[in-house]
């Protein structure tokens, strides 16, 4: 396949880029900044011929359109990862406007050029999570599934919820168009790295870089589904080593269960707890990723 990848210079995007190249796919890599030398120099010479890159601001739809029109081999699929990933270090209006506009530009323009397989990075924040005001967050039920009601408040969560709405609208408008919105959690190279950033506010979860990249490719190549679908892309087990208290981290201690953590830190912040979900797997994630496993053939722990 020839894949157009946005956000290719980013933390997740750079890993996805190498993942695609390692599997023999050619890539047009786009970002608002040049690909770092540390990334391009790590690409083997045998794969370098498969890579083209270009600096672009995706809020400029004419610039993106020109890239599609000038691609000599055409584009088989688009993976849109370009975004401002959180609202903490940017003006909220910039976060919202950049993410919503760039997503629509990529999705709509790709669709208009006959590209029917598109993947976009959504987030576990799409229903509202990490950046909501203190005391506002509440879940109808746990674990969290894709159909969980969306109540975003902060600009990042709102932008991701809108990007998913845009995907649904475009797929209704255009029969045959297929878009996957991948709801990644905290993306890290490995579990030990993830434990340093795991928090009760984020429901003790993470996603490996390999699992992110695998989900992107499978969302393009898998068969048996159509239209727009959102997928939770989260590791199958909680990422926490310590006691029930958020202050009790103790690396190597794995006795604490997911239900114990939820009852201590989230009591009163959810309406229903499906304890059957954890019956045989007490450290199972608070996020249900079985839809991705079923429709995409995705497996977090076997993605390398």
Image (cartoon, grey):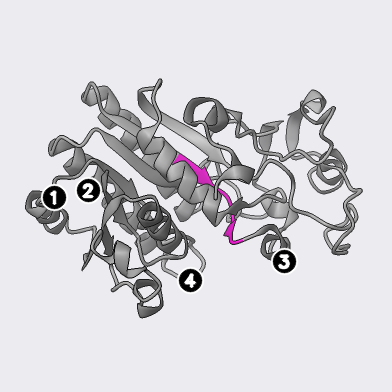
**Which numbered disc, 2 or 3, marks the residue that appears first in the sequence?**
2
Which of the two discs, 4 and 1, sits closer to the camera? 1
State the image quarter where residue 276 is shown: top right
**Cβ–Cβ under 8 Å for marks 4 and 3:** no
Distance from the alpha carbon under mark 2 to that under mark 4: 24 Å
Q: Calculate the distance from the C-alpha at mark 4 to the C-alpha at mark 3.
A: 21 Å
Q: Nearer the viewer, residue 300 or 245?
A: 300
First along the sequence among labels 4 and 1: 1
Q: Residues within 10 Å of mark 2 (few under 14, many from 20)?
A: some
Residue at 52%, 31% (x, y): give it: 297
- Can see residue 272? yes
Badge 4 marks a residue whose secondary structure is loop
- The residues bearing labels 2 and 1 have C-alpha atoms spaced at a distance of 12 Å
Q: Which residues are magenta?
A: 182-189
Is the Cβ of the residue at disc 2 closer than 8 Å to that at disc 3? no
Magenta residues, dominant SS class? strand
Q: Which residue is mark 2?
A: 105
Q: Residues within 10 Å of mark 4 (few under 14, many from 20)?
A: few
Q: Which residue has dot 3 on it?
A: 196
Which element carries disc 2, helix, strand or loop?
helix
Report, in whole angstroms, how far the alpha carbon at label 4 lies from the one at label 1: 32 Å
Alpha carbon separation for disc pair 1 and 3? 41 Å
Q: Which residue is mark 4?
A: 89
Q: Is residue 186 magenta?
A: yes
Residue 253's place in the image compared with 40, above or below, is above
Q: In this figure, which residue is indicated by the disc labeled 1?
A: 68
| Image coords of residue 291 (percent x, y) | 55, 28
Q: Residue furthest front?
A: 46
- Residue 261 place in picture, x, y as percent: 84, 46
Q: Do labels 2 and 4 touch, CB within 8 Å?
A: no
């Amino acid at each position: 396949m020839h894949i157009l990848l946005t956000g290719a210079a980013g933390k997740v995007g750079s890993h996805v880029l190498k993942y695609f190249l390692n599997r023999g796919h050619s890539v047009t890599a786009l970002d608002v900044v040049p690909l770092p030398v540390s990334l391009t120099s790590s690409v083997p010479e045998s794969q370098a011929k498969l890579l083209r890159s270009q600096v672009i601001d995706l809020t400029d739809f004419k610039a993106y359109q020109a890239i599609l029109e000038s691609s000599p081999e055409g584009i088989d699929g688009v993976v849109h990862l370009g975004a401002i990933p959180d609202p903490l270090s940017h003006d909220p209006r910039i976060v919202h406007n950049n993410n919503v506009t760039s997503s629509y530009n990529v999705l709509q323009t790709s669709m208009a050029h006959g590209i029917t397989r598109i993947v976009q990075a959504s987030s576990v924040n799409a229903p509202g999570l990490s950046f909501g005001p203190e005391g506002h967050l509440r879940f109808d039920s746990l674990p969290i599934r894709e159909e969980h009601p969306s109540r975003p408040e902060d600009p990042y969560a709102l932008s991701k919820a809108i990007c998913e709405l845009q995907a649904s609208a475009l797929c209704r408008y255009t029969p045959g168009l297929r878009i996957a919105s991948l709801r990644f959690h905290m993306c890290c190279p490995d579990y030990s790295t993830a434990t340093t950033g795991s928090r009760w506010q984020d429901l003790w979860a993470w996603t490996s870089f390999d699992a992110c990249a695998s989900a992107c490719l499978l969302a393009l190549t898998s068969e048996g589904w159509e239209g727009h679908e959102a997928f939770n892309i989260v590791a199958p087990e909680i990422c926490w080593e310590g006691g029930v208290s958020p202050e009790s981290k103790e690396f190597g201690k794995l006795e604490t269960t997911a239900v114990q953590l939820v009852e201590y830190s989230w009591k009163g912040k959810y309406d229903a707890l499906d304890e059957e979900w954890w019956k045989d797997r007490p450290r199972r994630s608070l996020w249900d990723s079985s839809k991705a496993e079923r429709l995409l053939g995705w497996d977090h722990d076997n993605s390398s």
